[in-house]
Image (spheres, grey):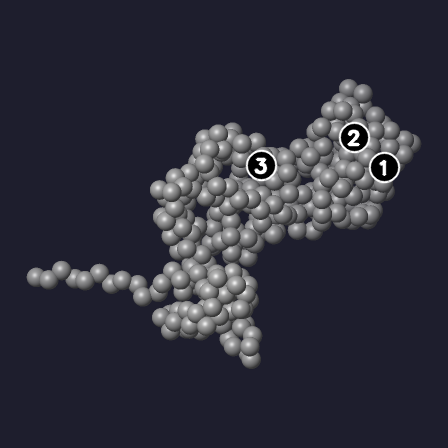
Amino acid sequence: MKKAMQTLPKITLKQLAVFVSIYQTGSTSRASEALHLSQSAVSSALTELESRLQMPLFERVGRRLNQHPNAHPIYVQAQAILGQSLTLEYYHKHQAGQIHIGASTTIGNYVLPPLLAELYRALPNANVNTYIANTQEVVAEVEQLNIDIALVEGMPRPADTKVIEQRAWRTDTLMVFAKRDSKWLTDMAAYNDVDNCYELSIEQLAKLPLLVREAGSGTRQIIDEQLLQHMPDAEIIMAIQQSEAIKHMVSADIGLGCLSQHVIEAELASGKLVQVKVAGIDLSRTWWLVWHKARHQSPIWQSFIDILTSE
């Protein structure tokens, strides 16, 4: 009895790489530049892939390519396949492997560096790429399979929860803070010498100028949900994309700020800034690990997870 022949796929990695590049760049000309292929070779590879799949991936409108509804699910699968292929190709050459780590701004600037140092101690030859942006932007990159694992603040809100895995990682606390001897607090707040902080009611805080992070950040999400909902008439004078900018503006006594304890711990220790406790308000939050279920979990991925969960 003859053994059944195993069916080999007719789709090639080159076709998938061409498709992914066109999807990301939006045109065959830019894809050809990125891949160092002729434009005719790129167009041919795309046509062959559509033929193999028996479905269109782009709609041709003149010289433009518009994504067909079929394109996104194929893109996700193609990214996963290419990622696994690269892991296999470089397994012996780079045993430590490669990992793309995403982090929301606070975590990326203040918490991620010592974690990366620990990863490098365990795997000195590790090839690590990082992407730091606000939570919404980082989760979007995870969905596109551009990031292996992400560390984000606030509750992740992926567009498709079925393909995203999320796990609670650790807790953090936001703090309202001000410049020591701030003009905004001189005649309003009582200073608690025991706890080294000012004490305000929610009604008092609502009358003071507040500097906050931009919409889309994990910090802003918690501020909206756990602070501003009690202050519908709060005086938010500025939404700022960088935590460092907020610190400097509060230090200049432009207003009060609200950031993670990790961001202002040095300034609190030096006495340059001081915590403002608001009665009845809890600003604790959960930090999350986020990854795409289709992403290949390489040995370095597991090593990083072990570091994160051993704390």
Q: How many marks?
A: 3
Of callouts 3 and 2, the N-terminal one: 3
Q: Mark 3 against mark 2, which lies toward the viewer? A: 3
Judging depth in this view, the residue of 304 and 99 nearest the camera is 99
Q: Secondary structure at mark 3?
A: helix
Residue ID for mark 1? 253
Judging depth in this view, the residue of 120 and 170 nearest the camera is 120
Q: Name which residue type carries label 2.
A: Leu
- Label 3: how many Cα within 10 Å (few below 14, some 14–19, many 20+): some
Report if residue 305 is visible in the image: no
As measured in the structure, the alpha-carbon distance from the residue carrying label 3 to the one carrying label 2 is: 24 Å
Q: Name which residue type carries label 1.
A: Asp
Q: Quadrant of the N terminus?
A: bottom left
Q: Mark 1 against mark 3, which lies toward the viewer? A: 3
Say the numbered circle drawn on residue 273.
2
Position of 38 with respect to 186 (left or right) is left
Judging depth in this view, the residue of 235 and 226 nearest the camera is 235
**C-beta proximity under 8 Å, tags 1 and 2:** no
Measuring 84% from the left and 43% from the top, which residue is drawn there?
209
Q: Residue furthest left?
A: 1
**C-beta proximity under 8 Å, tags 1 and 3:** no
Residue ID for mark 3? 112
Q: Is residue 307 above or below residue 71?
A: above
Q: Is residue 151 above or below residue 293?
A: above
Of callouts 1 and 2, the N-terminal one: 1
Judging depth in this view, the residue of 107 and 281 nearest the camera is 107
Q: Residue furthest top?
A: 194
- Label 1: how many Cα within 10 Å (few below 14, some 14–19, many 20+): some
Measuring 76% from the left and 42% from the top, which residue is drawn there?
245
